[in-house]
Image (cartoon, rainbow, N blue to C red):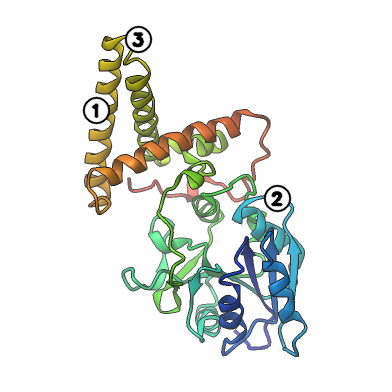
Amino acid sequence: MADSSEVVVGIATYNNVDTIDRTMEMVLGQTRPPDRLVFCDKSTDGTREQIESYADSDRDTTIEVIGQSGDGVADAYDEILNHIQGEYDVFATVQTDLIVDDEWLEDHLDVHAEHPEIDMVMGDYKGNEPTDREVEPDERPYYVGRNFSAKAGVLERIDGWDPNFLRGEDWDMRIRLAGAGTRVYAKTELGYEWQQGTDDPYVTLSKAKRKPTSVTFLSKYGPWYARFHPSHVISDGLSLASVLGAVGTVGFLSVSPTLAALSAIVFSLSVVVYWVAHLALRGGVDEDVIVGPTRKQLLNGIAVLYAYNRVVRGDVDWNTSGFDPENIPRYKF
């Protein structure tokens, strides 16, 4: 792809004042800097002002900040996509908690140039198994939302992201990109590492409140999703059962020992089945083989309740552009 291409890098920010300088220096210090660097920000800690301080510098890169009107990463990316209005040749993104090499953007463009038939290029976590080839929709690096580049028109073909997802937008994008027949090349060498001190537990209570769970996907895609990814639905069912069992055990303890005992049995069985499923399907569990999966399971159960509340609260205008079950392989689990 010619170096004359118009390249836009879009980044979502939310209270990143402690790390934004590293992100700015990393992106602006690329061997091939972007022509435009567009942020969608909803910070209250001075992140926006810190970004805008770079815009006054004499640089070849135009730096823009737009205020986010909605919530979540999907909404932020979608607002960026609407803001740039298709005026680009390649759109790329990298999250603020990541570290990429100085040749990151140049390497993305090189892959597009070497493989003109490819629609998107993904940069996976460098600690994962090395990949340097075109990947299929049922392979893990098919969509890496925190580090990718896309040709003009590819994201527009599926009307961008679905802003209804506060979290979990990666899974939804994978489904719709696959349905649209999007061809993807994954190359670990242009991947990322985590900035020191920015890694969070996979599931926390604050994340659980925003997690979509299978409830959201069933609401959006109907019974097809249960056939496509049955283990997701079963896992969430077990998670919900563990929460109800735990609450019942405590709640009925002083009222009805029998109901408390039955609730304890429900809790124990759901935890055991969930634990065994983790070993069978994932090949392992968290470092603490008892507390890790149980904690995650309970938080997932809470997430199911929050997701149900969001879905039933009112009419949701889903973005189903690109969805075509015939083009989407059944998930392996």
The C terminus, quarter of image: top left
Instruction: Identify the residue at horizontal 69%, vertical 58% (top origin).
Output: 42
Please tell me whether mark 3 or mark 2 is closer to you in this view.
Answer: 3
Mark toward the start of the polypeptide (3 vs 2)? 2
**Disc number at residue 70?**
2
Distance from Cα at disc 3 to Cα at disc 2: 45 Å
Kindly state the secondary structure of the residue where label 2 is placed: loop
Kindly state the secondary structure of the residue where label 1 is placed: helix
Distance from Cα at disc 2 to Cα at disc 1: 40 Å
In the displayed structure image, the side of residue 14 where residue 99 appears, left or right: left
Query: Pointer 1: what residue?
Result: 269
Q: Is residue 250 visible?
A: yes
On screen, residue 296 above or below 199: above
Please tell me whether mark 3 or mark 1 is closer to you in this view.
Answer: 3
**Disc number at residue 242?**
none
In the displayed structure image, the side of residue 146 where residue 74 appears, left or right: right
In which image quadrant can residue 11 be found?
bottom right
Tell me if label 3 and label 1 are in contact, CB under 8 Å: no
On screen, residue 212 above or below 75: above
Q: Amino acid at mark 2?
A: Gly
Query: Pointer 3: what residue?
Result: 255
